[in-house]
């Protein structure tokens, strides 16, 4: 029994550290390619190195960290080619969810989406990426959740976490915030009309537009 309790305690602690470390990663705490110091993280979370090591291994499996033998743990760097492939997969998942949602969306769900659109418009007017980006994530997550397919929602969520390491700043290029939200509004308009074909097309094209913005941003950054 003692061994079982110790195992459960260690497992729970590792899961807690993983969740907290994932939050730090997705909040932009670490730069791409930055080495994570296990000792520093252990002190920060008031745990031993064991749970930190397990958490890093789990996050590496999710594509957020890189484990380099004999060197340590590093923040994942995602190049344009890999990001483009992720966008293609994301487009299919997002369009599939929106297609499912078109026939079942409720007035309450439409109201929630409209509220997010208004708040993103306000953030776009102020060119505030810090305000817009979390709302953007919430809008997409809401559509996936409203679709009612938990497996689709879960797959999309894991993909977004990996893409998060690459895509945020591209939204600021050439009025990207306003353009992105105009695309959101077309998706919602099609959903309100219960036009599955139009909603699917708008959702798919929205993600491909994000892919194009990402490519343009990367080109400008390399000059």
Image: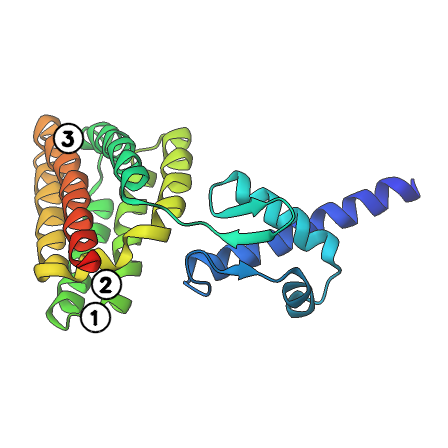
Q: What whole-number distance in Å separates the C-alpha atoms at marks 1 and 3?
A: 28 Å
**79 horizontally vs 207: left or right:** right
- Residue bearing the label numbered 3: 200
Give the x, y percent position of residue 186: 8, 44
Position above or below: 43 against 218: below
Discs 1/3, front: 1
SS state under label 1: loop
**110 horizontally vs 147: left or right:** left
Position above or below: 101 against 83: above
Q: What whole-number distance in Å separates the C-alpha atoms at marks 2 and 1?
A: 6 Å
Q: Quadrant of residue 11?
A: top right
SS state under label 2: helix
Label 3 Cα crowd, 10 Å radius (few <14 / some 14-19 / many 20+): many
SS state under label 3: helix
Q: Give whichever of 66, 159 is nearer the camera.
A: 66
Give the x, y percent position of residue 159: 37, 39
- Residue bearing the label numbered 2: 132
**For residue 128, which numbered disc appears in the image?**
1
Q: The C terminus is located in which quarter?
A: bottom left
Q: The N terminus is located in which quarter?
A: top right
Q: Residue at x 13, y 28 (%)?
A: 196
Q: Quadrant of residue 175?
A: bottom left
Label 2 Cα crowd, 10 Å radius (few <14 / some 14-19 / many 20+): many
């Amino acid at each position: 029994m003692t061994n079982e309790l110790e195992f459960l305690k260690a497992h729970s602690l590792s899961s807690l550290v993983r969740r907290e470390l994932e939050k730090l990663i997705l909040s932009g705490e670490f730069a791409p390619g930055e080495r994570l110091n296990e000792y520093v993280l252990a002190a920060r979370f008031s745990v031993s190195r064991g749970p930190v090591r397990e958490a890093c291994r789990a996050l590496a499996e999710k594509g957020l960290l890189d484990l380099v033998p004999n060197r340590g743990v590093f923040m994942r760097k995602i190049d344009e080619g890999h990001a483009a492939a992720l966008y293609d997969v994301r487009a299919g998942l997002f369009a599939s969810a929106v297609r499912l949602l078109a026939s079942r969306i409720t007035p309450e769900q439409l109201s929630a989406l409209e509220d997010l659109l208004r708040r993103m418009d306000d953030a776009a007017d102020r060119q505030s990426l810090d305000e817009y980006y979390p709302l953007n994530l919430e809008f997409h997550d809401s559509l996936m959740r409203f679709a009612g397919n938990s497996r689709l929602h879960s797959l999309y969520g894991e993909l977004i976490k990996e893409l998060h390491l690459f895509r945020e700043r591209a939204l600021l290029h050439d009025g990207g915030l306003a353009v992105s939200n105009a695309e959101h509004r077309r998706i919602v308009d099609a959903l309100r009309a219960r036009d599955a074909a139009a909603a699917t097309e708008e959702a798919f094209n929205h993600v491909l537009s994000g892919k194009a913005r990402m490519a343009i941003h990367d080109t400008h950054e390399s000059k």
